[in-house]
Amino acid sequence: MDPINIRQLAERLNLSVSTISKAFRSSYDINPQTRERVLAMAKELNYQPNLTAASLRTQKSKTLAVIIPAIDNTFFVLALKGIETRARQEGYHVLIYLSYDDRENEAALTQNLQRGRIDGVLMSIADGGKDSGHLLELKAKEIPVVFFDRVYDHDDYFQVTSNDQDSAYAATEHLIGLGCRRIAHLTTNQELSIAERRRQGYTDALRANGYQPDPELVLACSGDQDEACEEIRDFLERVQADAIFSSFEKLALLSYQACNALGLRIPEDIRVISFSNLEIAPLLRPSLSTITQAAFDIGQQAAALLIDQIEKRSLPATRRLMVNTRLEIRESTAGVDPETVYAFKKIEQCNT
Amino acid sequence: MDPINIRQLAERLNLSVSTISKAFRSSYDINPQTRERVLAMAKELNYQPNLTAASLRTQKSKTLAVIIPAIDNTFFVLALKGIETRARQEGYHVLIYLSYDDRENEAALTQNLQRGRIDGVLMSIADGGKDSGHLLELKAKEIPVVFFDRVYDHDDYFQVTSNDQDSAYAATEHLIGLGCRRIAHLTTNQELSIAERRRQGYTDALRANGYQPDPELVLACSGDQDEACEEIRDFLERVQADAIFSSFEKLALLSYQACNALGLRIPEDIRVISFSNLEIAPLLRPSLSTITQAAFDIGQQAAALLIDQIEKRSLPATRRLMVNTRLEIRESTAGVDPETVYAFKKIEQCNT
DNA sequence: TTGAAAGCGCTAACAA
DNA sequence: TTGTTAGCGCTTTCAA
């Protein structure tokens, strides 16, 4: 049973194709009764308008592309969920592409994006360097792009991020408030917008509290999980830290493993806090204190912003949107004492 | 800078559009030199063939739709990753739709699938009932469909699943081997292919070892997380189980919470094993024994099978493909004693 | 090896 | 309110 087309449906009803077309798009200049007839017959004959043809004609595909570095990452999963939710509400479809955190992959993907096939792109960029030629090309194609979380910081594009710097600041002060004096920072060895902002928040907090940031206490980890694991272990053995502030969930989990291996007790010997959206952080041993990003919201807002651009609706004045994080204190940074009042004040700020 | 079309490119080169078209598709009857000229000029003018137009003409979109109940679920995340990987290898694009485990949602999604827009569908179905009218409709549309994990068990469709029944059997025997006598089973209260098979494996294992399955020891949990949490707590208080075999990751995590609340120690008071793809199962308190599905493989194989259908390649004789699980024993089922030899034999079988 | 032309199924300007 | 028609950008048959 091949699907029928608009012409066949028109013939069956003794109507013209344009009338059918109007019926399906609820055009203002169609007789409601005619419309009913058309829809009824369409149902009977199992007719559905061919969207590819419509796309070709209108140059709109009602489809968004999402390009993210990874999917086995709680942040991106939730962000994607937010994107899908918003897209569905607006009648948009979502194509998903993974860059595997590889710039070349990412470039290949962006170069493949065809005008006509997609109406816009949501993107969280791969680690590594400022070589962003492929991102600039998007501009030439006149495809609207919204970056989220790992952004390409360029005035031409909208971006939605967490308040990374403030969050890192608050987390660091939380550790300081607990009496920690040698606070290590785990980050990535790649150039990455969020990594830089988080590190900045960390050093700012140290300075604001009278500590001189010590580069020795910062470890820029490899992207390779096994390598990173070794690096962290060596690092912890070397630096005698009494706390870890980790900018990435994976690194916190590796820290747990490293501490296990080294016989370091969390939180007694070393406290740990990390950016993370792990739903089961409370079930870890010990439960992990987290800076939790509003991942779903970020996805939703990024999608909304993109669709607003596509539909040429009014847009916010600022191109940089920020969504607050939540500081969730658990056992891995237990041992709160009166000194911490200030730290918790900051936490409150983050929560609102 | 509007993108140029094939005609403009043809004019610039003093060639016909059909020659351009052939150049891009590496048709056999094109002069290699002409082809080079075309591609060079295309690059210079930033020309890319419009795939929407090609789709309309060829009735092929090189696009797959993936419909899954949820994305914040490690199994589906990994399966999706497998799908994306395979799709990319074959030059296919992936549209993602979430049914939120709701049959009506799912029906709306499947009805929206247009021939022409997508070439095939990968689907893991929503819980709930045998009302599968919308799934049968797919057949009428002549869109190839491959089900995975949560399958619609129908001879018309290919399906890729884990060896659920055998895995459940092995897990249950593992618990029996540990000396557990009151083994509870946590499952969903919805009709679901995998739930049934897993339960079957559980009861088979009990019977094979001389135990009479006790319906009192089976809890069919609500899909709502908070409700399920209460149900599990009440259940555990009531039934005095010495082990839990959970068919779903979420339920195992809720069991952890329930045990915490009830002061039950895992594994001393009660052992826990679950179907789960949680990467950090080893970091839980206590680390969780899992039946780990080859989620990535399942996704990849399902995609491969679907693309084989679309491209009309040769297909396997059987419509039901099964991928083995791995039994990963950790602390939550610790306390192995000599009795367990048999159980571990089964584990070995599962691993190979 | 290249080119001319029809047409995929739809939308939208315009005519009736 | 309905109908006629051109054409979106490509592929493909067939002729040159």
Image (cartoon, coloured by chain):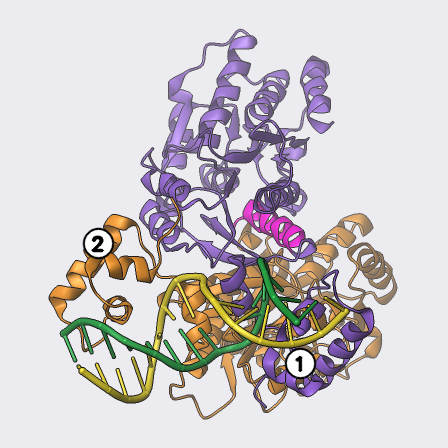
Chain colours: A orange, B purple, C yellow, D green
Which range is magenta? B73-87
Q: Are marks 2 and 1 in contact (CB under 8 Å)?
A: no
**Residue under label 1:** A135
Which of discs 2 and 1 lies nearer the camera? The answer is: 2
Image quadrant containing the C terminus of chain A: bottom left
The quarter of the displayed image where residue A167 is located? bottom right
Question: Residue visible at 50% across and 26% down?
Answer: B198
Q: Is residue B80 a member of the stretch shown in magenta?
A: yes
Q: Chain of mark 1?
A: A
Question: Residue visible at 73% across and 55% down?
Answer: A254
The quarter of the displayed image where residue A181 is located? bottom right
Q: Are marks 2 and 1 on the same chain?
A: yes
Task: Look at label 2 and name its amino acid.
Answer: Met
Q: Is residue B298 above or below residue B194?
A: below
Q: Using the image as rendered, state which of residue B309 and residue B227 is in the foreground.
A: B309
Mark 1 surroundings: few (<14), some (14-19) or many (≥20) residues within 10 A: some
Q: Is residue A109 a member of the stretch shown in magenta?
A: no
Mark 2 surroundings: few (<14), some (14-19) or many (≥20) residues within 10 A: some
SS state under label 2? helix
Image quadrant containing the N terminus of chain A: top left
Task: Look at label 1 and name its amino acid.
Answer: Leu
SS state under label 1? helix
